[in-house]
Amino acid sequence: MSRVSDRFREKEQELADALKARLREAVFENRYSLHPRRLAELGTENAGIFLNFLEAPDRTDALAYGQKLAREGIGEKTMLLVASDIQRFCRTELGSDIELLNPALDAVDAFSSRLLDGFMKAREAQILTDQEQLRRALSAALQSQGEELLIKNHAINTSINGIMLADLDGKVTWVNASFLQMWGCASADEVIGAAIGDFWVGEEARDMVRVLPRTGGWHGELSARRKDGTVFSVELSASLIRNEEGGAIGLMTSIVDITEGKRLQAQILQAQKMDAMGQLAGGIAHDFNNLLTAISGYLQLLLINAPRGTQIHQDLMQIKSAVDRGTGLTQQLRFFTRQATGMSQIVRLNEIALETYAILHRTFPPEIIIELSLAPSAWTIEADPNQMSQILVNLCVNARDAMMGKTDRSPGGTLRIATTNVELSGEQAGRYVNARPGRYVALRVSDTGTGMPPELLERMFIPFVTTKGERSGTGLGLAVVYGIVANHHGFIDVKSVVGEGTAFEIFLPRTERKDVEKPGRTAPSTLPRGRGRILVVDDEPQVRGVISRILTACGYTVILAENGQEALSRFSESGGIDLVLLDMIMPDMGGRECLARLRKADPNARVLIATGYTSDGSAQELLREGALAIIEKPLDLTALAEKIGGILGGAGAC
């Protein structure tokens, strides 16, 4: 972990700034009102404690620091968001370096677990202290009607927690205003005299009333049912009210609505699960990319020499069609894992929606009614228009299948596509994972189809999960949507009710950039020949072989290296290397480190990067670090030869 901790120490201020910003945003979520200066100090402390933990976990007491944050008054929701921010910092800094990322994430999980464990222990102690103080106050209040009214008015009526009093038989005798608000009751008359168990789902509350005289107290989570029938989650603390002689005279329960906190925690767990799936799919996409590069490369060489119109040419074109489909599948996996980005430009979602509507109107069954509700002054976003179209088409196709596949009633329904401008405050953004305050354009796609049960909602963005038949889909549609939205720094909100339908709402950040038209480019009509010495660095022998074949045929002298260390040796030994074609992902020494060392050895070294990873701004970072250009795998040999000819200067056609 020393390499990780050293790397993070250099970015300690950035982490501290991110945690300061998070604590300031969540200022109203805390138990106590803290001064901004104190919040800033806690953000700096938190960053330092985390880095100390990375360097010496056994000597860093994260448990004690979690207890300290609880005593400071930091809220539970804020703690979850801080843990999520630390994990996001690790992913941003380590990127695709799996060798460092996995142990770093394990360390983050261990730190977050100890931090939250200490925090919750301290909070439980605070809750028990508050409970005891309130219990004693109520016990004394029952001795005097005047004191009882005073304490009820000041200690209970003003509490944000729901308070319920009951007799020893479990019949409700009094509730405060917060309780009525939680359960949706207009007055206490609707509640007084009812059994405690009537307000909960299941028998756990009745069991609690039965054991309370023996245990003296109870604390846990329950599912409650409102007056309108809706269910919500609460944290309940119950205790006996005793008189001065110690005899039990009643029950008191203190109730906190934790529905929003549980929803946020579930979103964080889902995001962590999606990140893990992304790492797995990313590895598959990388290996598959290398296989396709070799297959496609040798296939292109065969096609050059196969006469058009012959049977062998037709057979090779069939193979090319299959390779292209494999390339498309890999591209979808890369979108999901955020390893691929398209050409970013100013996009108007209304135009995308209108173009998609024109296609759907002609191709969807007549049983489906398509409605548009587009904000006339919808803001612009910075995105790849093709990927935005793919998002909309994927969602609409899923909606069509859900409406045409209904078995309980006739097929068909209404598909609604809407856009609107949304400005999220800090409080509103806190309801979503990965959301930040700011201005967004929201794209909403809703249907009246079959809907999704909760167990499917939890897995819907996982690659290859599908409810369609074996021949009806790949299970990548929603995974691709998730990857594209995340790659554009947006987020998704999904609501679904079985039998009623599903609504996807996608939030994409507004851009302030103005649209600028770029002049078109024309592709060269011939494959350029050239002269020069090219060092090809790739850990896959087949990829090295096919690149060597085409470059040699075009007149270049090719030198091969199978890893970064060998590339450095070849570069220094050979001398006069005109261009380095460098793979990005290799064992031992990756392409980025090799690029830095090549540029250190020769600041004028010309390096062309071949990779399937172009996400998170990594392509722009490589260009800033000295790479001339990026060419994506699987390689198109013609495009590769043209790119090299453009760099070194061509002298004819191969």
Image: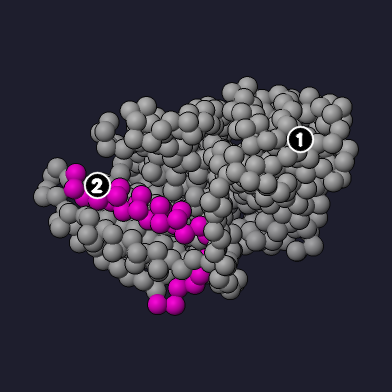
Q: Tell me, for residue 300, which label it has, or none.
A: none
Q: Residue at x 46, y 68 (%)?
A: 348
Closer to the chain start, of discs 1 and 2, is 2
Q: How many C-alpha atoms fall within 10 Å of the one at disc 2: few (<14), some, or many (≥20)?
A: many
Q: Which residues are magenta?
A: 376-405
Provide residue 187's location: percent of width, then percent of height: 34, 65
Q: Position of residue 585 (x, y in %)?
A: 66, 32
The disc label shown at residue 533, or none: 1
Vertical relation: 565 (above or below) 142: above
> In the figure, residue 106 lies in which quadrant?
top right
Q: Secondary structure at mark 1?
A: strand
Q: Which residue is mark 2?
A: 402
Residue 258 position in % (x across, y down) = 49, 49
- Indicate which label's residue lies in the foreground, 1 or 2: 1
Q: Could you tell me how many numbered marks the image carries?
A: 2
Q: Is residue 563 visible?
A: no
Residue lying farthest to the bottom in this orientation: 377
- Whether the magenta-drawn stretch holds residue 378 is answered as yes
